[in-house]
Amino acid sequence: MRCMLKSISWRMFVRRLGEFGFSGPLWGGKYPFMVKGNLRLHIPRDHGSDIDAHLLREILRQAEISIEEWMKK
């Protein structure tokens, strides 16, 4: 069975990435980013709207976090 992602608020998104060991967000350029070891993950700016499931899926892929892992936490 395939896990279904839902949109998520920016604040909750950042908090959840923190649970996976990412620190930040940090600003230094066009977009904020979060860091885990050598991985620098660019994230969208907080525009007050939710991060949709499609964008969340792409960010998780770049963060090397499976959808199943994301849904478990």
Image (tube, rainbow, N blue to C red):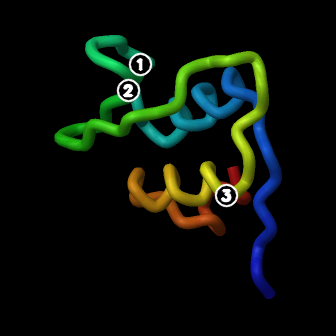
Compared with residue 15, is residue 63 higher up or lower down, i.e. above or below?
below
Cα–Cα span, label 2 and label 1:
7 Å
- Look at 38% across and 26% down and name the residue there: 33
Cα–Cα span, label 1 and label 3:
22 Å
Q: Which mark is residue 57?
A: none
Location of mark 2 (residue) = 33
Compared with residue 63, is residue 66 higher up or lower down, i.e. above or below?
below
Compared with residue 8, is residue 3 higher up or lower down, i.e. above or below?
below
Residue projecting furthest to the top: 27
In the image, which is nearer the foreground, mark 2 or mark 3? 3
Q: Give the SS element for disc 3.
A: helix
Location of mark 1 (residue) = 24
Compared with residue 72, is residue 21 higher up or lower down, i.e. above or below?
above
The part of the image, by quadrant, that contains residue 24 is top left
For the residues bearing labels 2 and 1, Cβ distance under 8 angstroms: yes
Residue projecting furthest to the front: 30
> Which circle's residue, 1 or 3, is located before the other in the chain?
1
Three-letter amino acid code at the position of disc 1: Gly
Q: Quadrant of the N terminus?
A: bottom right
In the image, which is nearer the foreground, mark 2 or mark 1? 2
Judge the density around disc 2: few (<14), some (14-19), many (≥20) Cα neighbours within 10 Å: many
Three-letter amino acid code at the position of disc 2: Phe
Judge the density around disc 3: few (<14), some (14-19), many (≥20) Cα neighbours within 10 Å: few
Q: Which mark is residue 54?
A: 3
